[in-house]
């Protein structure tokens, strides 16, 4: 069912908490399926909470979902699947974890982490210490050039 069909069709059904609870209980396998497809990013309980949020999102777009209508239920589940599995955080889900070795060895970083690491002279702490050393010596040179009471206080 398309969104346009829902808008033209039966959209006046009141959304009650009881209807939502019945909807959650009757679609347990869908919550588990969506959870598995997110590769553990969302638990089935997270998917159920996202269903509630998706109802509010659709309502803000002018679409009221009647949770007693099977075609409206499938529309909500399909929107939820698309949101959580296809479009949400694909960069994070498919990213390479640099803090873990690819074969799961403890204490080892990913080989890419060594390639991406900067040389020691690019380390911000080293650069700050170097700048402080340079700044202190320049200040000392300026103070020794101006023999005054203000220079002594500085």
Image (spheres, helix red, strand yellow):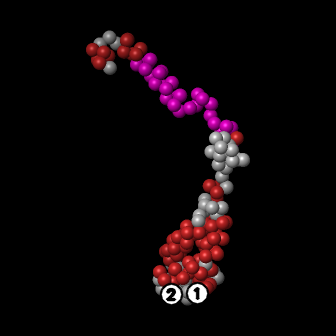
Report x, y in % for residue 6.
Answer: 58, 84
Quadrant for the N terminus in the image:
bottom right
Which residue corresponds to the image point at 37% horizontal and 11% vertical from the top-left? 145
Check residue 107 in the rendering and tell me which mark sits there, or answer none.
none
* 86 relative position to 151: left or right: right
* 149 relative position to 131: left or right: left
Report x, y in % for residue 33.
Answer: 66, 71
* 13 relative position to 35: left or right: left
Q: Reply above or below: 46 against 116.
A: below
Q: CA distance from mark 1 to mark 2?
A: 9 Å
Q: Residues within 10 Å of mark 1 (few under 14, many from 20)?
A: few
State whether residue 55 appears in this view. Answer: yes
Q: Is residue 127 magenta?
A: yes
Give residue 2's quadrant in the image: bottom right
Give residue 142's quadrant in the image: top left
Which residue corresponds to the image point at 56% horizontal and 32% vertical from the top-left? 123
Report x, y in % for residue 118.
Answer: 62, 34
Report x, y in % for residue 154.
Answer: 32, 20
Q: Main secondary structure of the magenta part?
A: helix
Q: Identify the residue under disc 2.
A: 13
Mark 1 and mark 2 lie on one chain; the one further toward the N terminus is: 2
Q: Identify the residue under disc 1.
A: 69
Element marked by disc 1: loop
Which residue corresponds to the image point at 51% horizontal and 73% vertical from the top-left? 52
State whether residue 109 appears in this view. Answer: no
Q: Which residues are magenta?
A: 112-139
Question: Do the numbered discs 1 and 2 sit on residues whose CB atoms are within 8 Å?
Answer: yes
Please name whichever residue, 133 or 63, is drawn nearer the observer in this view of the structure: 133
Q: Is residue 73 magenta?
A: no
């Amino acid at each position: 069912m398309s969104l346009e069909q829902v808008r033209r069709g039966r959209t006046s059904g009141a959304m009650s908490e009881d209807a939502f609870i019945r909807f959650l209980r009757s679609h347990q396998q869908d919550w588990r399926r969506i959870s598995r497809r997110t590769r553990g990013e969302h638990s089935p309980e997270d998917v159920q909470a996202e269903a509630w949020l998706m109802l509010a999102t659709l309502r803000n777009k002018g679409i009221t979902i009647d949770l007693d209508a099977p075609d409206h239920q499938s529309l909500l589940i399909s929107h939820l699947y698309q949101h959580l599995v296809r479009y949400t955080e694909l960069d994070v889900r498919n990213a390479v974890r640099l803090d873990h070795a690819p074969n799961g060895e403890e204490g080892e970083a990913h080989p890419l982490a060594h390639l991406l690491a900067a040389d020691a002279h690019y380390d911000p702490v080293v650069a700050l210490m170097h700048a402080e050393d340079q700044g202190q010596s320049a200040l000392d040179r300026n103070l020794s050039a101006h023999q005054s009471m203000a220079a002594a206080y500085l």
